[in-house]
Amino acid sequence: MNMGSATSRVTTQNQISIPAEVRRRFRIAPGTELIWEERDGVLSVRPKRFTLDDVRALCAGRPVRRRTLASIRAARDAALRAKYGRG
C-alpha cells in the first residue's frame, strides 16, 4: 500500500512533527527512535525496530531490553536537569 506523500516543516527550533497518517502507517509512537540515512544524496527516515543486540538476545533466549515511556521520560528529565539545572 502506498500512502502517497506527506510533508512536515522544520520549526525555528529544528524540530518536526510526523504527520498522523505516517505515524499510523508505520506504528510510530512516543519514544520510537528514528533512523536517518543518506544514500546517494537521498535522505530517508525509518523507525528503528530491533538492534543486532536485540536479535542476538532473542536467539539466545534472553529477554530483549525494552525501554518504557516512563524510563525515556526519566532520562530526558535527568538530561534537562544536568544541562539547565532544573527539571
Image (cartoon, rainbow, N blue to C red):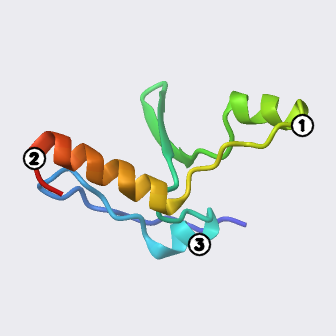
Of labels 3 and 2, the one closer to you: 2
Q: Position of residue 15 (x, y in %)?
A: 25, 55
Identify the residue under disc 1.
61
Q: Which mark is residue 26?
A: none
Residue drawn at (18%, 40%) of the image: 82
**Would you call the spot at circle 1 few (<14 residues within 10 Å), some (14-19), or many (20 or more)?**
few
Residue type, mark 2 in image? Gly
Residue drawn at (69%, 41%) of the image: 50
Identify the residue under disc 3.
24
Measure the alpha-carbon separation of dots 3 and 2: 36 Å
Q: Under tag 1, what secondary structure?
A: loop
Residue type, mark 3 in image? Arg
Of labels 1 and 3, the one closer to you: 1
Placement of 6 over or under 74, stated as above or below: below
Placement of 87 over or under 43, stated as above or below: below
Q: Earlier in the sequence, mark 1 or mark 2?
A: 1
Identify the residue under disc 2.
85
Contact (Cβ within 8 Å) of mark 3 with mark 2: no
User: Quick check: 57 left or right of 65?
Assistant: right
